[in-house]
Amino acid sequence: MAFDNQPRLPLPHGLGQKNGPNEGAPEPTAQPERGTTGRGRDRRPPQLLNGDNFAMIPVRYHPYSTARRSQVGRTLRPPNWGRIRLPTYQKDFYHEHTRNSQRSPEEVEAYRNANEITVKGLGAPKPILHVDEAGLPEIITKAIENLNSGSTPTALQAQCWPIAFSGRDLVAFDCTATKWKSLAFLVPAIVHAQSQPSVLDDGGPAVIVLTLTRETALRFQVAVQELSKGLGIRTMYLLSDEPKKPQLQQLEEGADICVATPGRLTAFMEEGKVNLGRCTFLAIDEADRMLALGFGENLRAIADSIRPDRQTFVTLTCLTRESRQLACQLTKAPVDVSVGTVTQEQQIHRVEHIVVVCEEAEKESKLVTLLKDILSDESDRAIVFVEMKQRVEDLVLTLRSRGCPAVGIHGNKTEQEHQWALEALRSGKAPVLVATDVATRAVELDNVRYVVSCDHPIHSSDLLRRFRHAARPDGTGRMYTFLRPNERVHAKELMWFLQENKQPLPPQLREVAKKKATRQ
């Protein structure tokens, strides 16, 4: 990808330095070595220190996780931050708008209740109700209004922006599936980068944004280009599944913001190609999913290689115990912001769960029979989840050939193809959507009644999201899970998930889980 490169403009006074360029940063403190990264390191389980909720709790990994742990990053050894004199930097840019300062605590509480916003943490600023209350440069304000299609920020943006602009660490969760969730951290990232001294060549980025997939990074690129237009901010992209040579060229030229996948970034770190000494803002999108897919070591290696007094913004897709523990590891005294009050148990209670045990060769025929049976009403819609992109294509062709109109989405399809498929589903032209988990992460489909899990998901957060798609207020949603007779590990993982959420266990699931282990 090419750079987003324009001449730099100064920040307007709305978001500027308070009393000097060096204020707002705490004194650097020593960062103890932790985790298991590197040879000869402390091998004890990483400990968490957060007085409110998780006092000295060892990290508990998923008991039946099938994800392989990444080997990348294990040879990296972080600097001895206690012996390094770090230059000060600015991270507190927030000036409360007059309208916001005049709002009473009762008005703030009413707004949070109406938008299902929960805030935990001392000294959290009030939410902003209009984009212009953020004190952003006009060029960024207009870009946000274009992306949001209006001047009203989403609930997540309204509460997160004042906290992030104040220089606080932040952990955010939004279960509402609103569009442009990423603006909650991309806007603070751009403001932070704009306020730091510009460094040419390979001085290293001031901001690092970590994302799980190339597809998500491409969506970020659209927002970053719109938000940074005319500000002179240079952005580079270090993404897996793309050639390394152009990315190395970007590293040599330098940039203010680096959007990267954790695997590619740590690979360049091991090769000595990345300079993280200038980084003071770290954003990690969907950190729990990264952990589930084996990137826990990568995240720790990256975080340990960045100065300990950095600002960190973490987003989560699932409020589980392990995801909260990971967030505590990566942040310091964070403010927790959650949007949406429906708990996992409440969502899963709204779904009838049925397990179908069959051999792999029987899945397609049973799926066709099932869909023809359950889609009796013209208003009914179904999502079929599979693991591989090619399987999406194959299954769509099979369903169409068997008289079942279907469309498919996955990471290799364009945004236009995604929108076409989703519109076909909504309109009823194709009542069946075949999809991968990644492709449906930001999709909200209110008229879906049935979800079919053909392939078992990698992590419980994907399983939860599948249940959410079937959850309906009237309790008529239904989830079908296809399991092979020898999928004992997956059956145990599903049992663990249901038990964690206090749900009944289907008898067929118990039978598969009891069988002797066989090669899967």
Image (spheres, grey):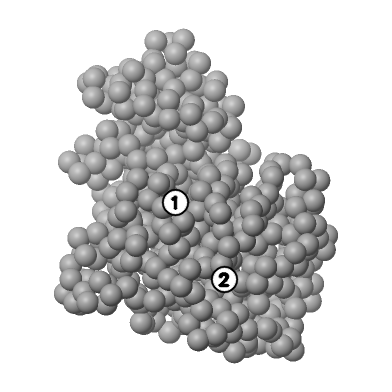
Q: Residue at x 21, y 37 (%)?
A: 476
* Image point (57%, 71%), residue name: 195
State the separation of the CA atoms marked 1 and 2: 18 Å
Q: Is residue 477 visible?
A: yes
Q: Please provide percent x and percent y for residue 362.
A: 49, 21
Vertical comparison of 76 with 479: above or below: below
- Mark 2 packing: few (<14 Cα in 10 Å), some, or many (20+)? some
Query: Which image quadrant is residue 82 in?
Result: bottom right
> Is residue 478 or residue 92 the one in the foreground?
92
* Residue 441, percent from left and from top: 45, 44
Kindly identify the residue that appears in the image at 24 percent across and 59 percent down: 115
Q: Which residue is mark 2?
A: 195
Residue 216: in sight, yes or no? no
Question: Observer-nearest residue: 29 or 188?
Answer: 188
- Residue at 75% across / 78% down in the picture? 79
- All told, the count of numbered labels is 2
Of the image marks 1 and 2, the number of the one nearer the N terminus: 1
Q: Is residue 400 above or below residue 34?
A: above
| Residue 252 horizontal/vertical position (percent) | 80, 57
Q: Nearer the viewer, residue 203 or 457?
A: 203
Give SS at disc 2. helix
405 over 267 or under it: above or below: above
Position of 338 relative to 17 (above/below)? above
**Residue 230 has which mark?**
none
Q: Crowdedness of circle 1 by 10 Å Cα count: few (<14), some, many (20+)?
A: some
The residue identified by callout 1 is: 143
- Amino acid type, mark 1: Ala
Looking at the rendered structure, the kind of residue marked 2 is Ser
For the N terminus, the quadrant is top right
- The quadrant of the rendering that contains the C terminus is top right
